[in-house]
Image: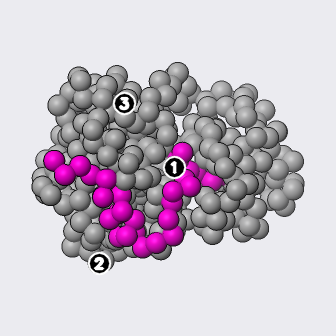
Amino acid sequence: MTQGIGGLWDVPVLVAPMAGGPTTPQLVAAGCDSGGFAFVAGAYRSAAQVEEDIRALRGLTPRPFGVNVFCPGPHTADVEAVQRYVDELIPEAERLGVELGRPARDDDDWHAKLALLIDTAPAVSSFAFGCPEAATMAALQRSGSLVMVTVTNADEASLAVERGVDVLCAQGIEAGAHRGTFDDTAADDELTVVDLVAAIATRHRVPIVAAGGISTPARVEAAFRADAVAVQAGTAFLRADESGASEIHQAALVDPRFSTTAMTRAFTGRRARGLVNAFLRRHPEAPSAFPEIHYVTRPLRVAATRLGDADSVNLWAGTGHRDARAEPAAAILDWLASGVPSS
């Protein structure tokens, strides 16, 4: 099998960055040591914490790896809509015995993380929720990083290409967790990963990594047939031995009570795909307000996890969640890689 972009991987299967706990240094190391590639999940963590993760990972593997961060978006949240939603959540807080968080706004330590990426030069600097400016991309590239941007439609891909991106991560509608859309308030094209890869490939020659619903060898093969150079899987690794996903999250993936997934803003104020539970059903009209809602609901999610209440916590998962295996990450990666076409 030929090596991946610049020799970054031997096996074109990437372990997706899963912020909030599922991604651990051990999971990243396992993905890389298996000949694939994996990312430190930098979102929701300070630059200092991400630096600790990078240091820990470099103590576990000599292989190249990536770091993923969220791009901060414009402050567009409707303050009154956020307050109405906060009021709607008061009974949830009372039931769980906690107080709601405050609807804070921040940039997730953006500038410090950019400085860290330039200083530490991971093999790939990866971005979601937006596209860095051309000058930022150039600075990262000069430091030795390739730049990857998550896109959900052809127009986002064109903007990233115009700014000098090295690799595009094409996120289909099947993907679990947050949508990588640049504008959460805009209409979503809702393209499947196969259709999105094909749409981008007709416009651009930039390498494309396919993400979303990559849960079986057959899905891997379909992505390559659409012109992807690699695939990225997240949900498929949630039950891996090295995963940091909570016990209730891992159990819910195969629990018949949680058989379907849906898009929701109920937990964070940004579109994300998760297993349909009672909380998601009770709050179908949450406003677009990230990270404000993320901070409001965080005490609820922490309490629900502590109590083992799967109906009150975000259970991020893609459409192929039933295929997730409780095995070492290396075995899962090898299984998915069996779907890579031989030529």
The label on residue 59 is 2
Q: Earlier in the sequence, mark 3 or mark 2?
A: 2
Q: Main secondary structure of the magenta part?
A: loop
Q: Going by the picture, which residue comes out furthest to the bottom?
A: 59
Q: What is the x, y in percent for residue 318?
A: 53, 47
Q: For mark 3, does the 10 Å Cα neighbourhood hold few (<14), some (14 to 19), or many (20 or more) residues?
A: many
The vertical placement of 254 against 280, above or below, is below
Q: Is residue 287 left or right of residue 142?
A: right
- The amino acid on which the numbered mark 3 sits, given as a three-letter code, is Leu
Part of the protein shown in magenta: 314-343
Q: Position of residue 48 (x, y in %)?
A: 40, 64
Which secondary structure, mark 2?
loop
Kind of residue at badge 2: Gly
The label nearer to you, 3 versus 2, is 3
Give the residue type that dot 1 points to.
Gly
Q: How far is mark 3 from mark 2, CA to CA? A: 37 Å
* Image quarter hosting the N terminus: bottom left
Residue 304 x %, y %: 74, 61
Q: In terms of image quadrants, where is residue 272?
A: top right
In the rendered image, residue 134, in percent from the top left (x then y), is placed at: 23, 33
Please give left or right for residue 280 compared with residue 226 in the image: right
Give the distance between the C-alpha atoms of the residues marked 2 and 1, in whole angstroms: 33 Å
- What residue sits 73% from the left and 49% below the top? 277
Which of pointers 2 and 1 lies earlier in the amino acid sequence?
Answer: 2
So how many labels did they put on this image?
3
Q: Give the camera-side residue of 132 and 340.
A: 340
Q: Residue beneath label 3, please?
A: 196
- The crowd level at tag 2 (other Cα within 10 Å; few <14, some 14-19, many 20+) is few
Q: What residue is disc 1 on?
A: 320
